Structures are given as structure tokens and as C-alpha cells.
Amino acid sequence: MQKFNKIFILLAFFGLSVVSTAQVVDSGICGDNLTWELTGSDYNLTLTISGTGDMYDYDDGYNTPWHWRTGSIKSLVIEDGVTSIGGFAFAVCTEVTEVIIPSSVTTISNNSFGACTSLTSVTIPNSVTSIGMQAFMNCPSLLSITIPNSVTSIGEYAFCDCRGLTYVTIPSSITTISMYTFLDCTGLTLVTIPNSVTAIGAWAFGKCTGLREITNLNRYPQNIYEVFDRVDLSLITLTVPACALNDYQNADVWSDFGTIIDDEYLPCEGSAGVETIKANNIKIYPNPTNYELKITNYEGKINNVEICDIAGRIVLIPHSSFLNSINVAHLPKGVYLVKIHTDKGIVTQKVVKN
């Protein structure tokens, strides 16, 4: 009997010790129908997000309800039912190494995982449609990331300072690569740009000094400006569709690449399957301009015109009655992209506003 009591006491002791390591340290709400819970002990905590719906957005990483223990959070569990990752929700969780985002999530908000400096792996499901500004900024341990075809927008600085990234494939659902998206990703060596991309913002690949290979699947070279700033283009091999070789060899910036290779096996397609007409069919003048832009020399129908800043953001859509003479006097000085949608396709030209 005495021996039995000793065993019982030992079992009880170990049982209690196991429970104590998984004890709830703190908990609360992080969405209208979401709760959070910190379990574990000392410097080995697990943060679990449960429930349904969107997470709250926070002003910065120090305003989350668990901010006082971010340096002790080793594991992050986002349960199925969560539909958005809140702004700054897991920023500065410096000890988290892996994140699996459930298929219920559609939005990764601004700076959701910013400065998660130990993060090496992220699984993004096909349900996600948007990745916010600075979502993974300053995650230097992130080695690779697969962006699914469900994603249609990636915010500025989304992967800035992810210096461990070595390659990235941008999905064909993306039409614009925002400015600064991969700024200072010095470990990035290989990039594939799909034929759906029609605009690439300034500094999108700035300071990516490790770049050695770029494959651009677009039949027509994008009009770009400072996209590869502080990158030695002479060290990079650019591969393009065989039918597009001459266009890239004569296009601003693209022609500066050290080697341009034509690949006959790459499909010869325009952006997202839209036929694009050559720029010399349309004349835009004066360029540079102070007050207005005139569009001439096109015999077909111009459906609409968009004027975008160098990051690809639309700043002016002139009324259909004034497509041949557009007032730009109110626009700040700078470089703009004029996208002309015609009955035969789209043409984009770069203009300077004085």
C-alpha cells in the first residue's frame, strides 16, 4: 500500500508538471469573433488565434495585446476560421521560425509579420488574395516563399530586407509589382516575371545586388524606371521569349542587361493574353510637358487613357471627351506612364511632367 502511494504521488507530480508547462499565461479577444491565448511557460510560449472572422488591425507591433511577450513566443497557431491576419498582428515576434496560414485566410494585412527575424518558412494558401504593405518586411531568415496564383495584389515593401530569399516566382495573377516590393533582398539570385505583369514600380528590385538571372515572360518589355536601382545589370542574364528579343534589346533599361537570351520555348504572349500595339503607332507630345498631352497618329478608336505614377498607381483618368488633349498641369513634376487602351490593344509610353 505504501509503495502504491509513492507511485501515485510520483504520477501526480509529473502530471501536474506537464499541465504546468501548457498552462494559460494570458488570453483575450483579437477580433469580433476571435480570441487569443498564450500557453506555455517562461521563454517557450505558443500563441493561438481561434474563432471566425477578421483579426483586428493594430497601429504597430507594440500595441498588440500580447506585445509584452513577443520575444518569448516560439510557436504561432492560426486556426481555421480566421479570415484575415491583422495589421502588425505578429510583428516583432522574433523567435517564431515557421508559420502555416490556414485556407480560411484571404488577406495578409500591412506589416503582419514585419521584423519576424527568425522566420524561415511561410505557407500561404490559395485562398489568400492580397498581401499588404511591409507584410514580411525585415524577415532576413526567410529562405523562400511561394506566392499562390490566388494573390492579385502585393503591397509596397512587402518583402523588403528579406535578405535570405534566393529566388521568387511571381504568380500570373499579378499585373503590377509595386514599388520597393523586393528592395534590398541581397540574396535574391533568380526572378521570374509572368506575362501578366504590365507595370513594375520604382526600386521594386533596388539594391538586389545578388541578382544573376531574370526571366521575363512578357512579349512586350514593360516601361520601367529605377526598378533595378543600385544593381549592376551587366552581371545579369535576361531571358525573354524568342519573338521579343529585338524589343528588349531596344527598350530602355532592359537593353542594359549584360546578356539577353531568347528562348524559343517560352510562349509569345502579350500581357494576360491582351494584344499590345507598338508604341510607334501612337504619338504623345509634347514630352516633356508642362500643361497638356496630345495623342495623335492613331487611326482606330481610343477607348480610355490612364496616367500612372512610376509605381504603376493610377493618378489620372481623363474624361472620354478629352482623350486627344489631356490637361496635366495639376500633376506634380516627375515621370509618368501613359496607358492608352485602344480597339487593338494597349500601348504604354513614358512621359516627363516639368
Image: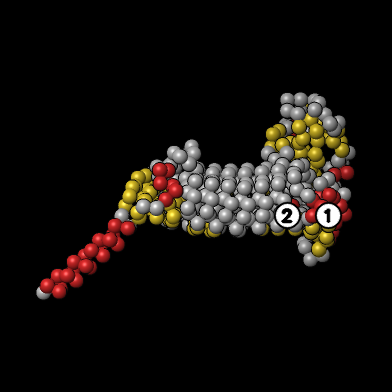
Give whichever of 311, 214 is nearer the camera. 214
Is residue 166 among what the camera can see? yes
Disc marking residue 270: none
Which residue is pictured at 48% across the width and 37% down the height? 59
Does residue 79 appear left or right of residue 280 in this picture? left
Give whichever of 234, 292 is nearer the camera. 234
> Neighbour class for label 2 at 10 Å: few (<14), some, many (≥20)?
many
Work out whether mark 1 precedes mark 2 in sequence or the reverse, and give the earlier one. 2
Q: Position of residue 309 (x, y in %)?
A: 72, 37
Q: Position of residue 158 (x, y in %)?
A: 60, 46
The Cα atoms of the two marked residues, 1 and 2, are separated by: 12 Å
Does residue 110 appear left or right of residue 25 in this picture? right
> Neighbour class for label 1 at 10 Å: few (<14), some, many (≥20)?
some
Asked which secondary structure carries label 1, the reply is: loop
Which residue is pictured at 40% across the width and 46% down the height? 69
Which residue is pictured at 62% across the width and 55% down the height? 164
Q: Which residue is mark 2?
A: 211
Does residue 4 appear left or right of residue 203 in this picture? left
Asked which secondary structure carries label 2, the reply is: loop
332 lies above or below 147: above
Residue type, mark 2 in image: Leu
**In the rendered image, which quarter contains the C terminus?**
top right
99 lies above or below 204: below
Give whichever of 244, 296 is nearer the camera. 244
Find residue 238 and report its image quarter. bottom right
Find residue 324 and report its image quarter. top right
Is residue 85 among what the camera can see? no
Which residue is pictured at 63% across the width and 52% down the height? 163
Disc marking residue 258: 1
Does residue 140 appear left or right of residue 218 in this picture? left
